[in-house]
Structure formats: structure tokens, C-alpha cells
Image (spheres, helix red, strand yellow):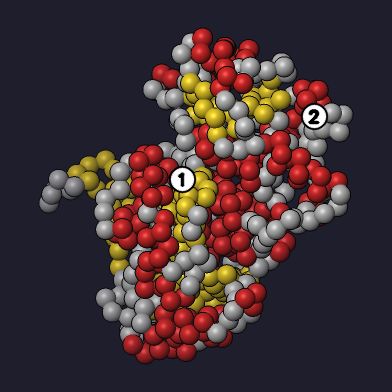
Amino acid sequence: MNASPDSIDLSTQRALSDWLPGRLAAENPSILVIGDVMLDGWWSGSIERLCREAPAPVVDIQTRESVPGGAANTAMNLAALGAKVAVAGIIGTDDAGEDLRGQLAAAGIDVRHLHTHPDMVTTTKIRISSGGQVMLRLDDSAGTVPADALAALAASVRAAVERQDAVLVCDYGTGVVAGPVRAALAGTLGNWTGESRPLVVVDAHDPRPWAALRPDLVTPNAQETARLLDRRLPEGQGRVDAVGGAAADLLASTGARAVVVTLDRDGTVLLTPDGVRHRTWARPAAEKQASGAGDTFVAALTLARAAGLPLTASLDLAQSAADVVVHQPGTSVCSTAQLSRYLEAFADTALSEEELERQLELHRAQGQRIVLTNGCFDVLHSGHTRYLNQAKQLGDILVVALNSDDSVRRLKGSGRPINTMADRAAVVAALSCVDYVTVFDTPTAAPLIRLLRPEVYAKGGDYTPEMLAETPAVEEYGGRVAILDYVAERSTTAVVKRIRDGQGAATAP
């Protein structure tokens, strides 16, 4: 957007710009990660023969790499994104524990509350791969966490939580944060109320035991959500609908103010007491060795919320961070610079009509349905994002056609647009629900519709299909017009008026 980053209140920033990760890093929130720290090993080699003892491939190891995993990977992501990070957990006095502590400390992470115990085995997960394909994973962990190690960690909880802006619990079920540690966290956080209480995020295989913490956010994945609901979830949009329909049950069982269900290739769904409030869409990659995208997602989400970004914008930013790491092999982190470059890549992203037509032909050949919507999308806000998320759910591929700058001036007057076409295209394209952006300069979108022939033409506002000039063009080839529940002009005009009057947000986001 055109406004200077230094003049933007993060609490009102609802669109993703390339400068935003830097601003969030500058806030430098203090975040405690407490949970199951691990060491991930990535061993890679070549396969040229089978072993004589069994029909199993022989991997001649050529490279070995160890990196922090589990809660430790979440902590590394937070540090790479600009947070002031402390980590609390239990490791062994073994080589893996020493390696893990050293890597965390080298990243600037406070490890004073990372306890060691001689009878503890540091959890390791070694993946053996060849030709980009993981062939085998070897897990090594303690069967039972020593009672005195749990007591020591529980005793340090109050000091660890003190002066933190956020507390992120990463519970993978090894027992490190069970029993006395969970009780200590609940007792400590229960003494805080209002603005003095840190943000509490729970990323757990089973978030139900953490309900006493009254978490602000819990982030179960699809399998964990299915276990919470005690039923199997369908695939695709059916899975999203099933999760949305169970919002009340998920909120009640987790004790959370909001639930973010992560659905891998299907993105994420935000559930609040009002139902499905927001959704993101993933841009998946075929990287066979990628791991830890969920850790990156929850790290970016926690950082953004701790720094004051609205919840829906925080989700979009976290999805972008996860999209970065799924294109990288191994257990990876997303840095501030990488996330900024990823968002910057959308800055010149509007396709010509001819190129867009070619791209859509490829999608149709795969049986995918095209949804087209159009508008000015000047000064993007939450009304726009809700509307675009609704439009995305009508098909597989969402195309947003933007009015050119001259077209906006003809429609809105000489003072508009606030943001240029390039800025508007970059911000809209950065939304996870948007697949393609193009620009048109004609009085209506009818010529573009006749060229692209979308299966669904979506429009928001107080319209009926008969009122739209584009309806005849859609009906010529048998398409469908869908009217969505959003009145764009009223909301945008209100935002522009507040900006010009020098007013802040009407209510807290």
C-alpha cells in the first residue's frame, strides 16, 4: 500500500505488504516456547543395491545434518522472524541434547529454562532419504520423563513466563509438559487477567487437557480435530464444512477463545463463537522432504498476534510463512527476509487477459471450476477478505479482476483510488484465497467474462442477478451468477473517510 509503514498502526493493518514482516520483527515481542523440544536428523545418500539379508535398499550415506525440531523448530522460526525467544523443556545430557542446546543458543534463544537430566533421552527423529524421497524415519525418545526433571521444569514455570508477551505451548505427547508442568502453567497464567495476561497459544496433539489455561488460540490439525470430534472427517470442502459445523464443540472442549484448524493442502479454518470467521488457502509444493510447516505456521501466527496484528491478517501471514517452508527441503525456518521476498513477489503479479486465458485453460483441463469476481478493492479491509474467501468456496480457482486506475476515477471521483493499480494488485494477490489477478478498463466486466467464461461470476452487494450489467454475458454460455453478502462501497467509503479525517479504528479488531 502507499502509506508509509512507519505511520501504520499494526492493529488496523488488514492486508499483507512486503514491509509488514519487518515491522513485526521491529516490535520484537518476547515469546516463551514450552514443550517437546527435539533434534531432527536428515541423512541423505544414494541407492544402488539391495541388501543380502532382506529385500531392502542399501542407502550409502553421503550427507548428515541435524537441526532443531518439534518445539525447538517453532522457537527457531520465532527467532528468525524477529521475536525475543525463550525455550523451556527437558533434554538429556547426551550428544543430541548438547547439539540441540548449542544450536538454540547460537540462534540467540534463551535456554536458561531448558533443563537437562542424565536419565532423559533427548528425542531425535532421523530421516533417511535418497533422490529427494524419505525412505525411513528412526525415532528415539525417553519412555518415561524422570519425575524430578518434571518437578524442576514445573518449579521454573513462573520465572519463565514472567515478562513474556506470549506463551506458546507445544505438546506432542511425550510427557514433558504433562502433570506438574501443566498445573504450574495453569496456576501461573490463572493469576493474570486483562491486558497484563500474555497471549496464550496451544499447539497440542490433544488440546483438551489445556482447557484450564483458557488459551487465546489452539491450533489442531485435521487428525487432531477428528479425534476431538470422535469422527472421521471427509476430504476437500466437505472437511471444511464439517469443521465449521463443529465450531461450538471444538471451542467448548478446548476452552479456547478461537480455534484454528490446519488442513495441510486445504489451508486453515478459523473458528470463533460466531462460526467460521476466516479461511486461508495453501499454495502447496511437491517437496518430498519438507517438514515442520505446522511449526512455522504457529510461530508466525503467534508472533503476529503478539505484535498486535489482527487475527485474520495474522492467519494470512502465517499461511504465507508456511508456504515459504514447504518449498524448502528438510526441517526449515522462514525468516523475516524470506517472508518479505515472498510477499514482494506479488507486487507485479497482474496477468494480461491473454496469459490469464492460457492459464485457465490448463486448470479446466484438470476439471477445475473457475470463479471470477471484480471490483476496485481500494484500501483492502476485513470486509473484502471475507467476501473473497466466500467467492473462493464457490469453485477451485479464484480470479479477481481489478478496475484500472482510470476506471476507478470514473466510478469514484478524482480522489480515488487511494492506492495505485500495482499496489492493489500486489495486496489482493498476496491473499491465500486468490489465485490470479488481472486488470480491466471497460465500463463493466462483461467483455472479460465473455473471454474467460468462468463457471461462476461472483459479486458482493445489495444486488440481484437481474440488476448486474454482467449477467447477460454470464448467461450466454451457461455460467452462474452468485451474489455474496458484502456491500463493498459502504465499507470502503467508511475506511477512506476515517483515514482522511485522521480517525482511528471505530472498534478494536
- Disc 1 crowd, CA 10 A, few/some/many (<14, 14-19, 20+): many
Rendered position, 309 above or below 19: below
Q: Secondary structure at mark 1?
A: loop
Across and down, in percent, residue 250 comes to 39, 60
Q: Is residue 261 visible?
A: yes
The residue labelled by disc 1 is 267
Identify the residue under disc 2.
412
Q: Element type at marker 2?
A: helix
Q: Label 2 amino acid? A: Lys
Please give the name of the residue rendered at 36% of the width and 78% of the height, measured from the top-left corner.
178
Residue 408: name its quadrant. top right
Between residues 136 and 164, which one lies in front from this camera angle?
164
Q: Name which residue lies at 66% across and 68% down.
A: 29
What is the C-alpha distance between the residues marked 1 and 2? 35 Å
Q: Nearer the viewer, residue 470 or 380?
A: 470
Local packing at callout 2 (Cα closer than 10 Å; few below 14, some 14-19, many 20+) is some
Identify the mark at residue 13; answer none if there is no mark. none
Sequence-wise, the earlier of marks 1 and 2 is 1
* Residue 73 place in picture, x, y as percent: 48, 62
Task: Decide: is 302 above or below 238.
Answer: below
Q: Amino acid at mark 1?
A: Gly
